[in-house]
Amino acid sequence: MRLMDQSGAVQYVKLAVGWDPVRRTRFGSRSRDVDLNASALLYADRTLVDAVYHEQLTSSDGAVRHHGDSTTGEGKGDNEVITIDLTRLGAHVDAIALLVTCYTGQTFPEIDNAFCRLLDGTTDRELNRYDLATAGPVSGLLMGILHRRHPAWEYHRRELPLAARHPVEAVPAITAHLS
């Protein structure tokens, strides 16, 4: 999907992840919290050159920013958001993998109302949405890949289930899907 709006190429996108917090049981105890993580992995010629996730909140050029790590899913709507200013990315970056992982290890069907979505960052128009429970009993998902196609960027939905709790664990599988 070519990223276009009424005025031309989309220049700013958001990756958003949301889920519901773990509910308390009748006896007041609760299961361990769920910690989903949004990640953006930046590639140049199929080589990982930068990453933005809960342990590194900004890309080296400042074009990609993680806006805070939710470790519980508390609050309404999006719990984690990564913004990507496509106009500020270094010219060498030609692909960005958009990834969701569960750091606490639960599989997506075990998490209430877990989703990820891609938005036009200027209008907040939803470009793509994925219900994570449909990914199957895995803890990671490559949602899609942004590819630089001059003069604009294109988004390719991938929906690749991954056995990964941390973005680093997903890199080998993602690299094979960059072309």
Image: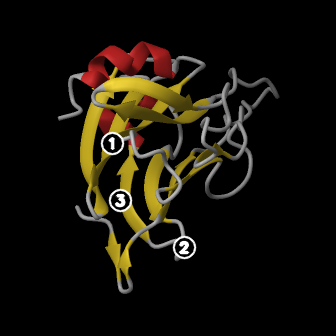
Q: What's the distance in space between the residues labelled 2 and 1, CA to CA?
A: 22 Å
Q: Amino acid at mark 2?
A: Thr
- In the rendered structure, the answer to whether residue 61 lies left or right of residue 71 reads left
Choose top left, top right, bottom left or bottom right for residue 45.
Answer: top left
Left or right of 15 in this view: 173: left
Residue under label 3: 128
Task: Give the mark nearer the N terminus: 3 vs 1.
Answer: 1
**Furthest residue toward right:** 28
Which residue matches tag 1? Answer: 94
Q: Residue at left 21%, top 30%?
A: 177
Relative depth, front residue between 76 and 97: 97
| 46 sits left or right of 167 in the view | left
* Residue hosting label 2: 122
Mark 1 surroundings: few (<14), some (14-19) or many (≥20) residues within 10 A? some
Q: Looking at the picture, which amino acid does disc 3 mark?
A: Asn
- Residue drawn at (44%, 23%) of the image: 139
* SS label for mark 3: strand
Between 59 and 132, the one nearer to me in the picture: 59
Please say which color scheme the image uses: secondary structure
The tally of labels here is 3
The label number, if any, that marks residue 8 in the structure image: none
Query: In the image, is residue 126 above or below residue 24?
Result: below
The disc, 2 or 3, on the residue closer to the chain's N-terminal end is: 2
Disc 3 residue crowd, few under 14, some 14–19, many 20+, Cα 10 Å: some
Residue 133, percent across and down?
A: 38, 38
Crowding near the residue tagged with mark 2, few <14, some 14–19, many ≥20 C-alpha atoms within 10 Å: few
- Point out residue 65 in the picture as x, y percentages from the top left corner: 63, 45
- What's the distance in space between the residues labelled 3 and 1, CA to CA? 20 Å
Mark 3 or mark 1, which is nearer to you? 1
Who's the residue at 41% across and 69% down the image?
A: 10
Q: Amino acid at mark 1?
A: Asp
Q: Quadrant of the N terminus?
A: bottom left
